[in-house]
Image: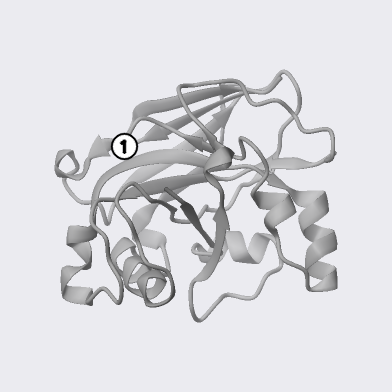
Amino acid sequence: MKVIAVGRNYVDHAKELNNPVPEKPVIFMKPDTAILKDNKDFYYPEFSNDVHFEVEVVIRICNEGKHVSPKYAYKYYDALGLGIDFTARDIQSIHKEKGLPWELAKAFDHSAVISNLIPKEEFENVKELAFSLSKNGITVQEGNTKNVMFDFDSLIVFISKYITLRKGDLIYTGTPAGVGPVQIGDQLEGFLEGRSMFICNIK
């Protein structure tokens, strides 16, 4: 499986990092070694001094797809969860300045927290999902999928033009405003529609 992530999919987040609002989805990838599941601890990497949290709704692909048609895109994912796209912001900033890829800042080991996944049918409306992240019991990010620039179906259509989607692939669909740094000793907890989805301790 592969992890496909979407950058700048919420206008308020793009603006808080002084990034232009994209006309097309901004796509990057993480390897399967980035996955951190089962509420396991995140160990602060030695190569960064500024790791940030970015909470995101995650969808799981259930069918292989290439050049997926918009009218059938909804059939290509069957479950949703919540995740964190940990980002080494100091490395990312340097790479952005030099026009280099983001992988070292985004794709390092255990940089993709993932919760248990919930069948899509259990949600009344996947286009209006409220989610949030707390740090040490204080809410630091709040978002709703109704505010994305590119919804789930649009992302599947766009990505599948370039990359074949396969069963089990995960798409991290973007983060709202409020991203910020973590420190050793912090505890992060993610919520989707009021339900606690994961707890991640920073070690």
User: In the figure, 95 relative to 107: above or below?
Assistant: below
Would you name the residue on which mark 1 appears? 193
When asked about the image quadrant of residue 173, the answer is bottom left
User: In the figure, 21 relative to 30: above or below?
Assistant: below
Nearer the observer, 58 or 62: 62
Tell me which amino acid carries mark 1: Glu
Element on which disc 1 rests? loop
Residue 122 x %, y %: 16, 38
Residue 138 x %, y %: 58, 27
Tell me the residue at 27%/57% (across/down): 127
Using residue 47 as the reference point, say whether residue 137 is left or right of it. Answer: left
Tell me the residue at 58%/40% (across/down): 34
Tell me the residue at 33%/66% (across/down): 156
Nearer the observer, 193 or 38: 38
Report the colour scheme: one colour
Nearer the observer, 103 or 132: 103
Tell me the residue at 47%/31% (across/down): 190
The C terminus - image quarter: top right
Looking at this view, name the residue that lies furthest to the bottom.
23
Using residue 186 as the reference point, say whether residue 5 is left or right of it. Answer: left
When asked about the image quadrant of residue 20, the answer is bottom right
Residue 76 x %, y %: 23, 59
